[in-house]
């Protein structure tokens, strides 16, 4: 037991504090003297290295969202939203090894033949569609269950539904103040919950825009998440 405790202490820097951490915890990004020295010495593990960089907007990225792992055989969708109100959806193609490993899996959707192979430049990531319509920064994004629509919320006081393939804006729901976040009800995708900066939660019918219920809370809600049962909604607020 003593040896095990000593090992754990060494992982977290409990022993020889002056020595650079050598266990499971390593300094990330760049900036520390030890990391700069390691880079000079040629240590490839001294910092995070990008595998691939994407830039289809000059504006700051405000949020990202991956699609479902087991919906498309050839790729996984990735949506990125920006401060200028634009969204870019990418197809992130699986490697040959991944496809081989998943060859015996069933996928609920047949991929369009035009999207079944990665781009010829071997980048393995391709732009699927661009969504333009928000006038201010986007605050949250999420796919619907079938992954044929994307929902976005924004400081421009709106919640918008978009067609994934066409990039077309399908629905717009307006609010009286900026909308930091929204989410679908887990077992009823025809209803979503949206929070605005006035600390009001609204339960909204997707089909007709009718507000089914309002709930005033103490402070602005910045994050929403249903538990696994779908019965409880957890809210993260501005006050922490």
Image (cartoon, grey):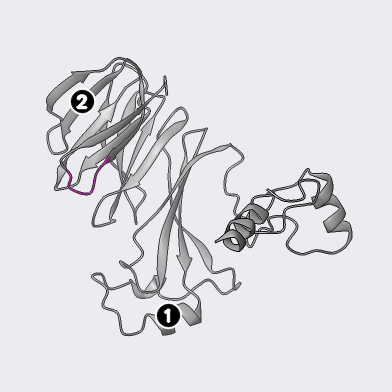
Find out whether the residues at labels 2 and 1 contact each other: C-beta distance under 8 Å.
no
Q: Is residue 204 left or right of residue 99?
A: left
Q: Give the magenta range.
A: 226-230
Say which mark, if any, is on residue 202.
2
Vertical side of 108 occupied by 89: above or below: above
Identified at 52% across, 33% down, the residue is 83
Return the x and y of residue 195 as percentages of the image width and height: 29, 26
What quarter of the picture does the C terminus occupy? Answer: top left
Say which mark, if any, is on residue 76.
none
Locate residue 73: give its quadrant.
bottom left
Q: Earlier in the sequence, mark 2 or mark 1?
A: 1
Q: Within the magenta stretch, is there residue 34?
A: no
Q: Is residue 5 left or right of residue 38?
A: left
Identified at 59% across, 68% down, the residue is 123
Q: Secondary structure at mark 2?
A: strand
Q: Is residue 19 left or right of residue 67?
A: right
Return the x and y of residue 45 as percentages of the image width and height: 73, 62
Q: Within the magenta stretch, is there residue 229?
A: yes
Q: Find the residue positioned furthest to the front.
A: 2
Return the x and y of residue 137 as percentages of the image width and height: 47, 30
Locate residue 4: give its quadrant.
bottom right
Vertical side of 118 occupied by 53: above or below: above
Q: Secondary structure at mark 1?
A: helix
Vertical side of 176 occupied by 23: above or below: below
Say which mark, if any, is on residue 99.
1
What quarter of the picture does the N terminus occupy? Answer: bottom right
Count the marks: how many? 2
């Amino acid at each position: 037991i003593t040896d095990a405790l000593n090992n754990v202490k060494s992982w977290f820097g409990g022993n020889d504090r002056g020595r650079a951490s050598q266990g499971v915890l390593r300094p990330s990004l760049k900036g520390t003297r030890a990391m700069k020295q390691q880079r000079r010495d040629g240590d490839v593990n001294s910092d995070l290295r990008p595998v691939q960089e994407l830039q289809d907007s000059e504006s700051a990225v405000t949020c990202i969202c991956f699609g479902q792992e087991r919906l498309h055989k050839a790729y996984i969708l990735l949506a990125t939203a920006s401060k200028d109100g634009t969204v870019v959806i990418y197809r992130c193609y699986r490697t040959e090894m991944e496809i081989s490993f998943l060859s015996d899996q069933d996928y609920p959707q047949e991929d369009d033949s035009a999207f079944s192979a990665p781009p010829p430049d071997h980048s393995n990531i391709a732009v699927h569609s661009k969504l333009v319509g928000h006038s201010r920064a986007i605050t949250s994004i999420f796919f619907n269950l079938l992954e044929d629509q994307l929902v976005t919320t924004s400081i421009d006081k709106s919640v918008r539904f978009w067609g994934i393939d066409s990039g077309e804006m399908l629905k717009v729901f307006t609010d009286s103040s900026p909308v930091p976040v929204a989410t679908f009800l887990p077992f009823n995708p025809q209803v979503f919950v949206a929070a605005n900066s006035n600390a009001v939660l609204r339960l909204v019918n997707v089909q007709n825009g009718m507000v089914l219920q309002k709930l005033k809370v103490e402070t602005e809600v910045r994050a929403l998440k249903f538990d696994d049962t779908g019965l409880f909604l957890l809210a993260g607020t501005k006050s922490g």
